[in-house]
Amino acid sequence: MREIPAQTIVDAVRDACIRANIELGNDVVEALKRAVDDEESDVGKDILRKLLENAMIAREERIPICQDTGVAVLFVELGQGATATGDLYQALEEGVRKGYQEGFLRKSVCDPFTRKNTGDNTPIIVHLSLVPGDRLRIWVVPKGGGSENMSRLFMLPPAAGWAGVKEKIVQTVAEAGPNPCPPTIIGVGIGGNFEQSAILAKKSLLRPLGTPNPNPRLDPMEKELLKEINKTGVGPQGLGGRVTSLAVHILLMPCHIASLPVAVNIQCHASRHVEIVL
Amino acid sequence: MDAEYHLTTPLSVNDVESLRSGDRVTLTGIVYTARDAAHRKLLELIEKGEELPIPIEGQVIYYVGPSPAPPGRVIGAAGPTTSYRMDPFAPKLLELGLKGMIGKGKRSKEVIEAMVRYKAVYMAAVGGAGALMAKAIKAARVVAYEELGPEAIRELKVEKLPVVVVNDTIGNDLYQEGQEKYRTVSA
């Protein structure tokens, strides 16, 4: 059994929280550059250029890309041949706590009713899976509230089929309009069940922008959806234009014979994800 | 291209009546920050007939919860939050003379109507451009509800804060107009 010291995990997660919030990934930067060329609206082009400028300022001046540094979502794959010394969950949480405190990131977690801020951006949200091997792989994905609020889940009748699924996804993006900070990335989870579809939708966002879906069945579906979404006219910041979304990512798995679950997780242009392998 | 205005806060009725949806504006002067939690507290004071911690008449409220200021800076990232969460509270403040709101995203019918009735405008800042917006903020101090952390009311001294007019005093809506121009399917 390979042992990974808890402190190593704490330090890696701390650094990842800070890096994710300050340095916009190259995949997103490249996608925004392509979007400047694709956009027809002058206002839209101007906004896309501002977003690129914003990313540059954040990186150079070491301040967050967006003030909403999100709730810390962590996708964790623990190799079955590895173990963390001490409490893995506590180590992840301590890493987030330190990252948000020491990185001057906004603490955005509160009680649902009293709205009292927990003060250290915990609790965190962890999706843990066991995998072969002896590595610990962690994706740190800070997720903002604006885009999360516009996300939707539908339990469709199976007869709705692909046409019904497409309609719901396009409708979700059109109704969200300017709220989730377009240009967005649309994470779609199809199948599984109620909660699994939502996790698939979020997980689909981990794939770097500009890379094709490795599943040849899903790749054309993503392209078709993106084309439909970009006909809505929402455009950058919802002020009208061709580039409403930068990409659609789909993950799919079999579901119950009575069901057709579809989850749409909208991600703003500040798509932050940092991968750690320990 | 729509007109570009440089305005100084507080805003007069003339200032806001000259603006039309689509106009680009840069604001200089004092703006106050407030999100839904602070709005709720302000409305409670109004209902009780008590004094408010900030002036409302002629003022501009920026819907923002900035990230903490690192050493040597006045503020962290400071882009707009989604405005619909303030919709239940905005008409009352407009009635009291609030002249401008800065945020992102659509407003309710009630808020748009109140802007026409009481003469005020809603302006959008670029959502997610928190680092860029922070450059226009020259000073910041908490003036109320420190316990709310990022949601406290702050007085910001801004210099040429860049925004675009979404809703004007005659009922125009840039989101609707802008999107219709590029829509090629029925949404």
Image (spheres, coloured by chain):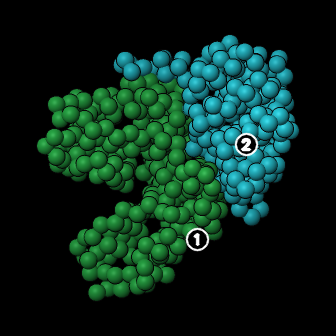
Q: Residue at x 86, y 38 (%)?
A: B51
- Find numbered disc 1 in the image and state the secondary structure of the residue it sits on: helix
In this rendering, is residue A1 above or below B105? below
Q: Are marks 1 and 2 on the same chain?
A: no
> How many numbered marks does the figure carry?
2
Q: Residue at x 69, y 40 (%)?
A: B40
Q: Residue at x 83, y 17 (%)?
A: B14
Chain letter of the residue carrying label 1: A
Marks 1,2: beta carbons within 8 A: no
Residue B98 visible somewhere in the drawing: yes
Chain whose colour in the figure is green: A
Q: Nearer the viewer, residue B21 or B117?
A: B117
Q: Position of residue B86 (x, y in %)?
A: 64, 35
Callout 2: few (<14), some (14-19), or many (20+) C-alpha neighbours within 10 Å? few
Q: Which residue is denoted by mark 2 in the rendering?
A: B41
Q: Is residue B69 left or right of residue B1?
A: right
Residue type indicated by callout 1: Lys
